[in-house]
Image (cartoon, rainbow, N blue to C red):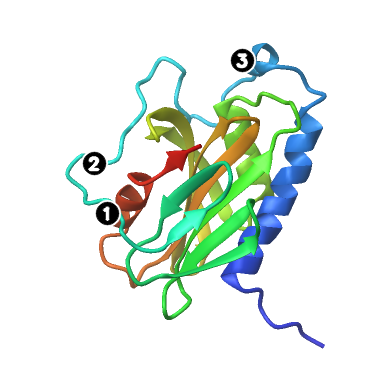
Amino acid sequence: MSRPPATPGARILGAAAALLVSISMLSGCGSKDAAAADPPASSGSSSSDSSPASPSPSVEPASGGLLDTATASVNAPQGWAVSTLVKNQTVDAVTDNGLSVVGLSVISTFGAEPSLQQMARLDIRTGSYTHGQVMPEAEVAGEPAFHVHGKATIGTTYDAYGLEHDGHTVTVVFKLHETLKNPQEIIDSVLATVALK
């Protein structure tokens, strides 16, 4: 007997739960000093001395509903339906046709201080997507952030931008279907609204 396919929100929630377990295991793995000795995940990953990429300064910030937690918030694109999956932990916004999702995930690090490389690799290992690659560092809310890219489903890309803030891994996830126009503008406009609390 086949099960119905998981909704985009359920997949984000599942990835957040897996990330929570992985982050908790990091708490026994040492501090940032131990993480600094960690070799790069792939040849596509950035070095620590490269400058982070920033969202385009000419992009207009997203003005849709607020994805809000006690640790961070971000605005969705206009017209996307916002729903809270787990209070103060997982919030997402979905297009009318349900094919594209923007999600905000806030997960405790349980005292660990993971590096951007470690957070990126955890996302690749625990996320519900394939062909994950560590991309050059980006900037989120004025802070260096990891960026990973992959394929969520056929015709849908996956991008996640994240950082550690106030004892939490804060990640903004984009699962954007190929039917959307200007996906990079959507990403830049949403990232321009990230607020850390």
Q: Which residue is mark 1?
A: 185
Q: Is residue 6 above or below residue 121?
A: below
Question: Which of 14/72 is in front?
Answer: 72
- Disc 1, SS: helix
Q: Amino acid at mark 3?
A: Ala
**x%, y% of residue 111?**
74, 26
Q: Earlier in the sequence, mark 3 or mark 2?
A: 3
Question: Which of 135/88 is in front?
Answer: 88
The CA span between labels 3 and 2 is 29 Å
Q: Is residue 13 visible?
A: yes
Q: Which residue is mark 2?
A: 56
Do the residues bearing badges 1 and 2 touch, measured as CB atoms within 8 Å? yes
Identify which residue is drawn at 36% across, 68% down: 178
Question: Which of 135/58 is in front?
Answer: 58
Which quadrant does the N terminus fall into? bottom right
For marks 1 and 3, give the one nearer the viewer.
1
Q: Is residue 80 above or below residue 41?
A: below
Q: Is residue 41 visible?
A: no
Q: Earlier in the sequence, mark 1 or mark 2?
A: 2
- Disc 2, SS: loop
- Viewed as shown, does residue 88 lie left or right of 24? left
For marks 3 and 2, give the one nearer the viewer.
2
The quadrant in which residue 51 appears is: top left
Q: Which residue is mark 3?
A: 36
**x%, y% of residue 173?**
50, 52
Q: Amino acid at mark 2?
A: Ser
Identify which residue is drawn at 67% across, 45% down: 125
